[in-house]
Image (cartoon, rainbow, N blue to C red):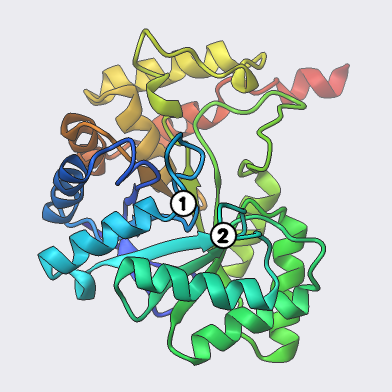
Amino acid sequence: MKKIRLGRSDVYVSALCLGTDLVGSRIDYTTSCKVLDLFAENGGTFIDTGNFYAAWLPGCHGGESETAIGSWLKERGLRKSMVISTKLGFDYPGCEGGLNAVEIERECEKSLRRLQTDRIDLYHAHRDDPQTPIEETMEAFDRLIRAGKVRAIGASNLPVWRIAEANTVCRLRGWSAYCAVEQRHTYLRPRHGANFGPQIPINEDLKAYCRREGMTLIAYSVLLQGAYTRPDRRIPAQYAGPDASERLDALKAVAAEAGATPNQVIIAWMLQGDPPVLPIVAGSQLEQLAENIAALRIELSGDQIRRLDSAGNPDVKQAWLR
């Protein structure tokens, strides 16, 4: 599997990232190991988790995903070959949330213990914390990097202006800055005013900023939990915009041309875009994960990417004349 550099850091990851929010909880440990094994056997090295996964499920308290991954890494002896990304910022039992220095230090230590490792390869601020001065947050992250407990830092669910503010502060102070941004992203575009709660979708401003700064874009909720292909899953209402039908038609047409599934085309479209977007894929069933990994063999033509990009776009000339 092709390797991609995270921004300007010294961390290289596989072209696909494995999402593990339900690993060790809704997905039992035995099945979780099979999923992780399949990913690793196919060259996958990038695993995404979070400190509070999956505190939202009944009977879970947070840390279940990290704990399962830590056990799998130890049992398989794969820590050196895997790149582990985890996050902090949300509250869960025993954690108040936020990005103050005390919280960052404490949650880092808890994640290290659960993951049974001495370092976190990519540590994300998982949500904004306007109550904590940005200098306190970024200095705390920098201390972890200098201590060797974290290799690189990223931002997730932060607006682009806050990411730019943080990185400017880091440049002025000589601290390590965010090298990657992980946000919600899929082929369909959110309708105007769509509300995703604390989740923030990738937009054109963020793409432009990451392109200019050399930062890596990472996407979650890429396949909308199977809504593109499963008849029992509806497209979320937040994506029911005026261009949705045209974009779905374009997606189906390109999939037929490429001999691929719509899910595979979405993954290929992200990886081959400008700027490229690294997708987080998951799959509670091995067949689903295998389908996603197979998307790496698909090479879209320039015309196919152009059609996917432009589907549903208003006619610029007609809009200008109006």
Quarter occupied by the N terminus? bottom left
What is the quadrant of the C terminus in the image? top right
Query: Is 54 left or right of 17, judged from the image as shown?
Result: right
For residue 58, above or below residue 256? below
Question: For mark 2, what is the residue?
Answer: 94
The local secondary structure at tag 1 comes to: loop
- What residue is shown with label 1? 62
Q: Are marks 2 and 1 in contact (CB under 8 Å)?
A: yes
Image coordinates of residue 78 in percent, x first then y, are 16, 68
The type of residue carrying mark 2 is Gly
Q: Secondary structure at mark 2?
A: loop
Decide which of 70, 257 is in the foreground and name it.
Answer: 70
Nearer to us in this view, 62 or 258: 62
Q: Residue at x 77, y 69 (%)?
A: 165
Q: Of circles 2 and 1, which is in front?
A: 2
Asked which quadrant contains residue 10, the reply is bottom left
Q: Is residue 241 visible?
A: yes
